[in-house]
Image (tube, rainbow, N blue to C red):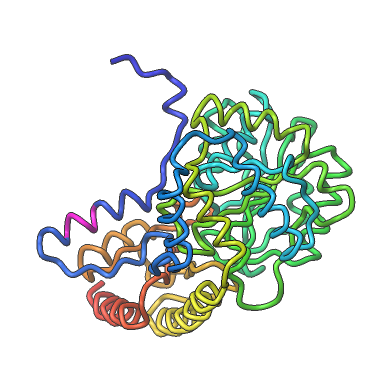
Amino acid sequence: MYIAKRMSRLGTETAFEVLAKAKQLEREGRDIVHLEIGEPDFDTPVNIREAAKKALDQGWTHYGPSAGLPEHRETISKYMKEYWDLDYSPEEIVVVPGAKPIMFFTILACVEEGDEVIYPNPGFPIYESMVDYIGAKAVPIRLREELDFRLDVGELASLVTKKTRLVIVNSPANPTGGVLTKEDLAAVAELALKNDLIVLTDEVYNRIIYEGEHHSVASFPGMKERTVLIDGYSKTYAMTGWRMGWGAMPADLAPHVTRLMTNSNSCTCSFSQIAGIEGLTGPQDESKKMVEAFRERRDVIVDGLNSLAGISCKKPKGAFYVFPNVTGTGKDEKWLADYFLDEAGVACLAGTSFGEYGKGYIRFSYANSVENIEKATGRMAEALKSI
């Protein structure tokens, strides 16, 4: 079978590869603590599940508009105003199966071959992958540990050239848990306005934040017209398998993104969208409880990792990941991640899975119980004695 050359430019997510290896070890009888995969370990709240069942019985099983059900986009519009004081009309919102399509569609619709896209590194690997795939140049902006994994706005400005088309920001961030400050985002906005740039802001963890408040670059004067905002249900409502997210964007971009939906997915599942309406408008108690559980787990895993020889870990302000520095162990991050899985039964990801500037780090997801987190750190402590 002939495979197009462009496929060689398309990356992947290492988390799913490590998950597959960990599952194979479990089939062989090993006990594995899963700290590799980035999804809540909680069930979708009951009211959302019940809404989906009811929607099925009511016949919400047919095609819907490619942009999303009108009543769903209206609900999202109200939700964004209530939570983030952002004014988006339903016509400026496109519903998609998960958050990733908005990343891909925005890059496809707005970036030409040869253009440059600045993206966070270490960062979600799909950013770089999609930019490379379409033939643009991916330009990394380093997220530095000494800045609590925020970007250096001066360094960001130095990376802008006449070819720069798009800047990607992610806050709270995967894989670091870093949160950009209002001042950081103001500087990004100023840079975008000065250089006529588009900003793609990935805010899927915006409800999972432990200190301070979430801010969106779209809220700054003049930025709504040049920002594409990504949000969704997977993290906030433990709905990863439902595959449902949305993009809020300028009105003149929405029809183009909608056409990409028509050409790829046709539409997002109708009964899932009805359940999503219930998620946004119904009780938020379960979502809040989940965040508080993550807060407790964060504290446990940070303390545990900082007790390990050769490892130091900053306390993240959002999401459900930690990104400890492992250079003190004297071992390469990939070697160490493999060692923890093979010898300690702890699945995690090498920092370089998230870009070149992840060298010297490992990512752990603390979307697991306190008991399992403590088990994992205990096992790693023992394993480190043997290297």
Q: Is residue 184 above or below residue 121?
A: below
Q: Residue furthest left?
A: 28
> Quarter of the image holding residue 37?
bottom left
Above/below status of 128 relative to 153: above
User: Residue, x 62% and y 36% (percent of image)?
Assistant: 67
Can you give x and y, in whole percent of width and height, for residue 245 in the image? 56, 49
Quarter of the image where the C terminus is located: bottom left
Q: Nearer the viewer, residue 234 or 144?
A: 234
Residue 167 in the image: state x and y as whole percent.
Answer: 70, 44
Q: Nearer the viewer, residue 317 or 356?
A: 317
The percent position of residue 122, horizontal first and vertical second, equals: 54, 54
- Closer-to-camera residue (368/263): 263
Q: Name the residue at 77% across, 46% down.
A: 89
- At a point 79% along the width and 48% down the height, the residue shown is 157
Secondary structure mostly taken by the magenta-highlighted segment of the chain? helix
The answer to which quarter of the image holds residue 29 is bottom left
Total marks in image: 0
Q: Which residue range is magenta in the image?
A: 21-25
Give the percent coordinates (x, y) of residue 337: 33, 61
In the image, 386 versus 169, the foreground residue is 169
